[in-house]
Amino acid sequence: MKRYDVQEILIDAPADRVFGYLADASNSPEWTEAFDSVDGDRAVLRTPAGAIEIGLDILASSEQGTVDWRMRFPDGTVETAWARVVPTPDERTVFTFVLMPSAPMLEQLEGDLSQLSETLAGVLVRLTGLLEIGVDA
């Protein structure tokens, strides 16, 4: 049984702009339906089962082109979502996202991997639309 999903999308925007937007946690509710709100290192995660407050750290390295979201759940489990921002020679960006839910709480709250993968595909399309139309990042 596959326990991860890797998705990518080409964004018609420079990598520094994409990185800056993603590395700012306060932008998360604009592009992903998973977060109702983000305030500092706390976030409200929206799920089919309802909302839950979690701890949220964004670990970002512009040098490496990585943006990772570390989520701390009330039961003590920690989940990480890994992403990479890769510049192309023509000033566009390949954005990759690795989804690997492991905590039973996350699966219980958001659904199984196939449901999460389908949701992620829509999120990447929304992110692309925001960055290509000129959202200030």
Image (spheres, rainbow, N blue to C red):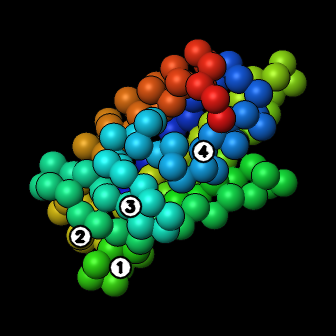
User: Which of pointers 3 and 1 indicates the residue nearer the eye?
Assistant: 3
Residue occupying the point 25% across, 43% down: 115
Calculate the distance from the C-alpha at mark 4 to the C-alpha at mark 1: 23 Å
* Crowd rating for badge 4 (residues with CA inside 10 Å; few <14, some 14–19, many 20+): many
**Residue behind mark 1:** 77
> Residue 22, labelled with which disc?
4
Label 2 vs 3, first from the N-terminus:
3
* Crowd rating for badge 2 (residues with CA inside 10 Å; few <14, some 14–19, many 20+): some
> Residue 129, labelled with which disc?
none
Q: Quadrant of residue 55?
A: bottom left
User: Which of pointers 2 and 3 indicates the residue nearer the eye?
Assistant: 3
**Residue behind mark 2:** 105
Calculate the distance from the C-alpha at mark 2 to the C-alpha at mark 1: 8 Å
Q: Amino acid at mark 1?
A: Thr
User: Which of pointers 3 and 4 indicates the residue nearer the eye?
Assistant: 3
Give percent across and percent down for residue 42.
42, 67
Label 4 vs 2, first from the N-terminus:
4
**Is residue 4 toward the left or the right of residue 49 in the image?**
right
Task: Tell me the SS state at disc 3.
Answer: strand
Do the residues under discs 2 and 1 have CB atoms within 8 angstroms? yes
Up the image or down, 108 lies above or below 11; here it is below
